[in-house]
Image (cartoon, rainbow, N blue to C red):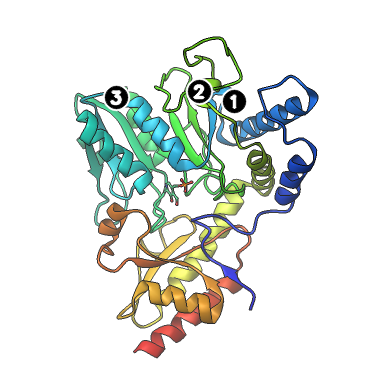
Amino acid sequence: MAIIYLDNAASTWPKPPGVKEKMAEVIEDFAANPGRGGHALAMKASKTVFRTRVQLSRLFGIQNPNNLFFYLNATQALNQAIKGFLKEGDHVISSSVEHNSVRRPLEYMSKTKQVEVTYVEPRGDQLFHREDFVQAIRPNTRLVAISHASNLTGVILPVAELGEMAKQHGITFLVDASQTAGVLPIHVEEMKIDMLAFPGHKGLYGPQGTGGLYVHGDIDLEPLIHGGTGSQSEAIEQPTTRPDRYESGTVNTVGLAGLLEGVSYVMEKGVEDIGQHEWELVKKTIVGLGKVAGVTVYGPGSETKRVGVVSFNIQGVDASEVSFILDQQYGIATRAGYHCTPLGHQTAGTEQTGAVRASYGIFNTEKDVEILIEAVSEIAAAFR
Ligand SMILES: Cc1ncc(COP(=O)(O)O)c(C=O)c1O
């Protein structure tokens, strides 16, 4: 049975042609340590890492590639941004659809540094409105930290508007682009994003173990990790030069070589076209599942654009059981249960049930959607 992979919001699969080959080439030909030696193989490794930095900077409109630091995933990048920026007594504005990788560091800072957090909620239309964020501003608000899109409902937050708002009020703006990097256009200058965290293994089609953080040159974060950088080795203090200040230890050269291929593929296909493709699949899913008796689809309806994520439940059937049957009997890979976002589940009204999540990528087709809808119809009928 061929697998229909609908868990791209967790990690995309399959990867585009060239990713695996490039990673194998590094392992076979030049897996030396980048930035540590001056010999030819180390230089080749360094060049590969730098080229990935440059390509990502092109994608996100980052002027200086050295303001982009590599991490193993979005979670590490978000921890560096949040814990490295916030000071005792600061107030943060966030949203009620945050993933735990934003929420938990914020709650940790709240416990240990008396940081205050306001989670802005969507209105009755299930959308987020700039005015509600403006209302939340206090004299000690130093950071707005939000997801670009929910990993549960795919709802998109008005990032450009919130960037403008943050700038007007002198507040630093952090965006978690885990569900949007490679799917929606992101330009850090135009959208006034001061810090951007992203995974490499989702919409950028790199391997797991890759991700990064952009930090505007005027923002000085306290590094979370201290250690060897291959530079200023005689100094006992962490270097101030970027990216070294925030990249202690050996980076994932093999993974970053794969990420370069993935990002290049995305740029060649065009981010807007990819987003449109996923949106077409989502619309078809919302409309199709909406016609199945006993099925509830979460988030705004098919008239409101969202990223390639659709969460749903079949009345009277546990979400994990639905996902298990889809996997075992139909060869359809979805994710079930709770999606690392208790806030998001409260907002969607699924805190008691969890949900089945189907999420799309470049390689999914309309046929995949039709097979999913047919399978869900059969399961719903069997339990009626
Ligand atoms: C919105 C959001 N933020 C953060 C993350 C964490 O990403 P990573 O697994 O790369 O740390 C995810 C992963 O699903 C996500 O969906």
Checking the image for residue 65, the label placed there is: 1
- How far is the residue under mark 2 from the one under mark 1? 22 Å
User: x and y percent of residue 372 in the render?
Assistant: 51, 75
According to the picture, the residue beneath numbered tag 2 turns out to be 227
Kind of residue at disc 2: Gly
**Residue visible at 59% across and 70% down?**
4
Instruction: For marks 2 and 3, give the one nearer the viewer.
Output: 2
Q: Quadrant of the N terminus?
A: bottom right
Checking the image for residue 52, the label placed there is: none
Residue 64 in sight in this render: no
Q: Quadrant of the C terminus?
A: bottom left
User: x and y percent of residue 319 in the render?
Assistant: 36, 72
User: x and y percent of residue 230 in the render?
Assistant: 61, 20
Checking the image for residue 169, the label placed there is: 3
**Residue visible at 61% across and 48% down?**
207
- How far is the residue under mark 2 from the one under mark 3? 36 Å
Kind of residue at disc 3: His
